[in-house]
Image (tube, rainbow, N blue to C red):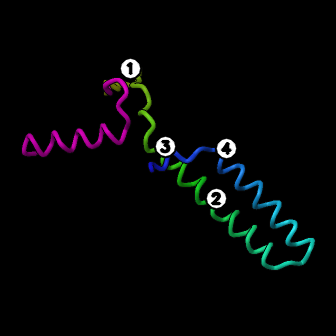
Amino acid sequence: MPLAAIPASTVVLLMGVAVVLAVLGHLSRIRGLLATGLLLLFLATVGMLAGGYGAWRDSPAPAPDPLRGDDRQLPPNETVGEAKQNREIERRHNGD
């Protein structure tokens, strides 16, 4: 499963449940409930970071800026990661 496939709504829902469990654990002084809430909050945070990194990695590059003399062109629907991989393949093929 690609990292960008982690839906934001799932992460937000998990964070909400985690906060509720942690608060209930604090109020009721049940350590197990508090620990479960904090663990879920930690896992949701890791999921948020992983999903954000995956979305960033798979995002297309910014458009070329002709005012700065930037003539780079990405083919349509090619992401930054794919462009880097294709350049590396071309370098190896050309013997550079």
> Residue 78 appears in which quarter of the rendering?
top left
Look at mark 1 in the image and give the residue it sits on: 66
Image coords of residue 36 (percent x, y): 73, 71
Q: Nearer the viewer, mark 2 or mark 1?
A: 2
Measure how far apart labels 3 and 2 are at the Cα level. Answer: 16 Å
Check disc 4 and give the amino acid type.
Ser
**Label 2 is placed on what type of residue?**
Thr
Tell me if 66 is positioned left or right of 94 in this view.
right
Badge 3 marks a residue whose secondary structure is helix
Closer to the chain start, of discs 3 and 1, is: 3
> Callout 3, which amino acid?
Trp
Mark 1 Cα-neighbour bin, 10 Å: few <14, some 14–19, many ≥20? few
* Disc 3 and disc 2 in contact, CB within 8 angstroms: no
- According to the picture, the residue beneath numbered tag 3 turns out to be 56
Would you say residue 60 sits in the magenta stretch?
Answer: no
Q: Which residues are magenta?
A: 73-96
